[in-house]
Image (cartoon, rainbow, N blue to C red):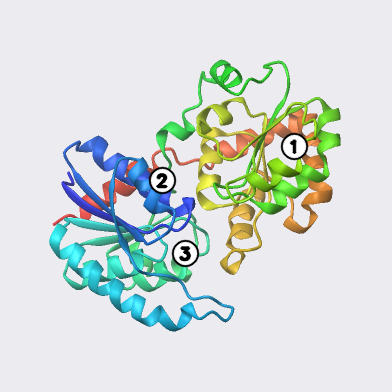
Amino acid sequence: MITKAIISGGGTGGHIFPAIAIADEIKRRNPDAEILFVGAEGKMEMEKVPAAGYEIKALPIAGFQRKFAWSNFALPFKIIGSMIKARRIVKKFRPEVTVGVGGYASGPTIKAATMIGVPSMVQEQNSFPGKTNKILSKSVQKICVAYDGLERFFPQEKIVLTGNPTRREMVSIEGKEAEGYKFYDFDPNKKTVLIIGGSLGARTLNESVVANLEKLKESGVQVLWQCGKLYHDKLENELKNTDLGDIKMVQFITRMDLAYAIADVVISRAGAISISELCLIAKPTILVPSPNVSEDHQTKNAMALVNKDAAVLVKDVEAKEKMVDEVLSLLLDSTKCDALKKNIASLGKPDATASIVDELEKLKK
């Protein structure tokens, strides 16, 4: 049983929410466990982690900008400062174990922990690892992964295939349909499409909806459209005089379990955590991978499902023309929907979070 742990990383929901899921599982097993998060100044984790009830410390770390930026000249000093601060945090808190989930802050934190002998693990969500986890893989004891074939990047003897951690409350959808229709003020007799582009939003998905508003309205389906924080105000202003019919646009979905419960088809980016959740809720899914990610890893994530007939792929560059037609076609094809549901369900790993914490407990001295 773990009594003290540091969890580090963040930058995006795809890193933060798995970290919170791991923390929740540690607390479920030992309510008295002390858990400290370490994140990057100004990043999303500084808001989301305290909202989940955990303490977080910030490092002055940042990433390298590929385009010319004056901030790049300060980067070496930020790295050194972050290493010094991370070492102080680890020494003062004295964790039994540390976990890195990817993102800028996990580099200095896990490096500092391993340098003073704290047993450490990284959790890699994607089919193509991030740079931070690749570097840390040399010094940690365990690497929990969600995809096969990562021995190309990590020492094989350290790899454990666990799946990605998901928050229980997000994927517990059984028997929640009636509550979901009421919560979102939707008609249970109509087909429902759920469009999710991540907490910040996805420009291509938003543009594809706007370009096909009339087609969606005429189809008679209802749409729960999460447009994201970055795009909400602009879209609200752009569409303020437009009759959206049964299309409900929201900035952020607070009850994802209810949204999943009422969805007949889901349209989503192909982030690793989104895919892990979709495998557990087992709904027909259309994936539109983002091209704006390192090593095109979202396409690799998506193809792991598409190659097993567990999801439909729409390329980002073709989304405006094809995304809405694809979803309307799928809603009319019950045989295809049933096959997709069966195949995606077979890929779900409901015990992933527990398996990761099991591995963490084995590391404890």
The CA distance from mark 3 to mark 1 is 47 Å
Q: Which mark is residue 150?
A: 3
Q: Where's residue 285, x and y in %?
A: 66, 40
Residue closer to the observer: 311 or 256: 256
For the residues labelled 3 and 2, the Cα–Cα distance comes to 18 Å
Q: Position of residue 231 (x, y in %)?
A: 64, 49
Residue under pointer 1: 240
Q: Is residue 67 left or right of residue 87?
A: right
Residue at the disc numbered 2: 165
Instruction: Please give the name of the residue rendered at 64% of the width and 58% of the height, measured from the top-left corner.
Output: 299
Tag 2 secondary structure:
loop
**Is residue 344 visible from the viewing direction of this image?**
yes
Considering depth in this image, is 21 or 214 the residue closer to the camera?
A: 214
Dot 3 alpha-carbon crowd within 10 angstroms: few under 14, some 14 to 19, many 20 or more: some
Residue 240 versus residue 40 in the image, above or below? above
- In space, the residues marked 1 and 2 are separated at their CA atoms by 39 Å
Which quadrant of the figure contains the N terminus?
A: top left
Marked residue nearer the N-terminal end (1 or 2): 2
The mark nearer the N terminus, 3 or 2, is 3
From the viewer's perspective, is the residue at label 3 or at label 1 nearer?
1
Q: Are marks 3 and 1 in contact (CB under 8 Å)?
A: no
Q: Amino acid at mark 2?
A: Pro
Whether residue 106 sits left or right of residue 343 in the image: it is left
Q: Is residue 164 left or right of residue 292?
A: left
Q: Tell me the kind of residue under disc 1.
A: Lys
Question: SS at mark 3?
Answer: helix
